[in-house]
Image (tube, rainbow, N blue to C red):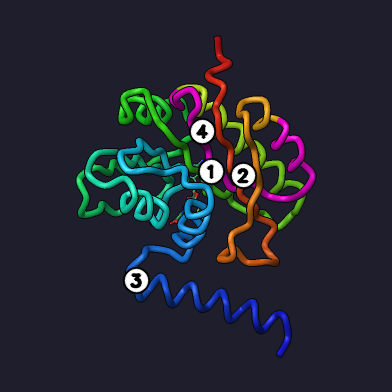
Amino acid sequence: MTKQWNMERKHEQYYKMAKKNKYRSRASYKLKQINKKFKLIKPGSYVLDLGAAPGGWSQVALEIIGNEGLVVGVDLQHIKSFEEENFIGIKGDFTSEEIQKKIVRSLEGKANIVLSDASPKLSGIKDMDNLRAAELAETVLEICDSLLERNGSLIMKVFQGVEFQNTLKKIKKKFRNVKTTKPDSSRKKSIEMYVVAKGFRGSTRN
Ligand SMILES: C[S@@+](CC[C@H](N)C(=O)[O-])C[C@H]1O[C@@H](n2cnc3c(N)ncnc32)[C@H](O)[C@@H]1O
């Protein structure tokens, strides 16, 4: 059996598991696996989920936070509501000032953790896509500046490629402890990686 066959099978397995366990996306397992390892989302956490549709990560975050915390999910696409009342969905582009203001208002100015699984629209031109992903990552860091509490955390998808080291450098300036991880549920051949950053140093805006 080829390596390729094994990888496709694993991918299929996560898809089936998500269906069976009523998760909105296979991506739910990425956050489950990352959080199992790093334990950043906790009961009562205030969570911002950027690039959240269809809602797989928000669903996992809601399971962990329980009744006390809040999840705010933002996406260009509509995110269907959840049974839980402590979820706020925002439809729009998080690079826009108007949506950023809405985000800050919804979280009353404070998040314990920012998640971003956002992917730009891919053109297929590797360097250009890498650049777009890096720009998106930069916006995520600006949003951290406006609402992430001191010592808060970030879990963000990044793409390996020309801008990878540069993005990592920018994250390290803002967070004390930065690691990269690739959960088992992320396709091996995909260039995506996840940055897990802890110990936010606080806003550098002023
Ligand atoms: C891989 S999907 C997220 C999957 C999600 N984590 C889940 O578990 O269901 C990436 C999402 O990022 C969103 N996205 C990309 N750029 C965005 C932007 N500027 N503003 C809001 N959402 C964006 C896309 O619309 C897409 O739904």
Spatial CA distance of label 2 from label 3 is: 26 Å
Q: Nearer the viewer, residue 122 or 201?
A: 201
User: Could you tell me which residue is drawn at 55 percent across and 9 percent down?
Assistant: 206
Instruction: Look at discs 4 and 3 and give the one toward the viewer.
Output: 3
Q: Nearer the viewer, residue 86 or 200?
A: 200
Residue that mark 3 sits on: 21
Q: Is mark 4 within 8 Å of ligand 1?
A: yes
Say if the magenta span includes residue 172: no
Q: Are marks 2 and 1 in contact (CB under 8 Å)?
A: yes
Spatial CA distance of label 4 from label 3 is: 33 Å
Image check: 85 left or right of 167?
left
Image check: 186 left or right of 127?
left
Q: Kindly identify the amino acid type of the residue bearing the numbered disc 4.
A: Thr
Q: Are marks 1 and 4 in contact (CB under 8 Å)?
A: no
Residue that mark 1 sits on: 155
Instruction: Look at discs 2 and 4 and give the one toward the viewer.
Output: 2
Tag 4 or tag 2, which sits nearer the N-term?
Answer: 4
Above or below residue 184? Residue 12 is below
Spatial CA distance of label 1 from label 4 is: 18 Å
Q: Callout 4: helix, strand or loop? A: loop
User: Could you tell me which residue is drawn at 38 percent across and 25 percent down?
Assistant: 110
Q: Kindly identify the amino acid type of the residue bearing the numbered disc 3.
A: Asn
